[in-house]
Amino acid sequence: MHFARAFPQLLWQPSDPEPTALRSIEAWRAEAGLFNLLPPVSLDARAIEWPLARADAILAINMVHISPWSATQGLMRGAGRMLGAGAPLYLYGPYRQADVPTAPSNEAFDQSLKERNAEWGLRDLEQVTAEAESHGLGLERLLPMPANNLSLVLRRKG
């Protein structure tokens, strides 16, 4: 809803693999009454086929670390297939970076994620960008964000 309000000229397609989350998204969407926010679709990034044929951009906030690595692989595969040349894939969340100490709060968060699900946890930025590269996406920008998070702007290569 935040982005749909902030960018009314864009059409937003929310998605989630969990039925409970989809119901929640739909309830918020219905209450907001925004013309540019479509009903949510069930989408598991790991799936070979997605319920959408193309996208002008993909936004994934707090997904990479709260899902199995196979979901990140699927996200990159899907983005590489769905995005046109120059289109962005925007990722937000905490990452480990080579030669950059991980904040103690992120180490504790990583531990709590792994306790909830052994397949979750902070990912190495270099591994994420290498996976993106293998699907035709290049890292354009890396922006430090509050609370030791990063914004990654990847673009589909021509």
Image (cartoon, rainbow, N blue to C red):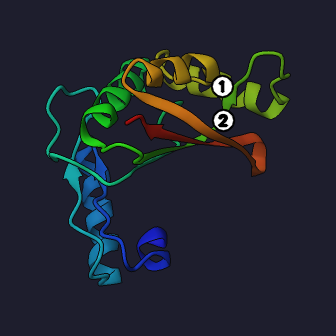
Measuring 41% from the left and 17% from the top, which residue is drawn there?
Answer: 134
Q: Position of residue 7 (x, y in %)?
A: 45, 75
Task: Please say if 17 is above or below 34.
Answer: above
SS assignment at label 1:
helix
Task: Please say if 130 is above or below 9.
Answer: above
User: For the N terminus, which image quadrant?
Assistant: bottom left
Alpha-carbon distance for marks 2 and 1? 9 Å
Q: Position of residue 13 (x, y in %)?
A: 28, 60
Residue placed under numbered mark 1 in the picture:
110
Q: Amino acid at mark 2?
A: Pro
Residue placed under numbered mark 2 in the picture:
94
SS assignment at label 2:
loop
Q: Amino acid at mark 1?
A: Asp
As drawn, the label of residue 59 is none
User: For the C terminus, which image quadrant?
Assistant: top left
How dense is the environment of label 2, judged by Cα within 10 Å: few (below 14), some, or many (20 and up)? many
Whether pointer 2 and pointer 1 mark residues with C-beta atoms closer than 8 Å, the reply is yes
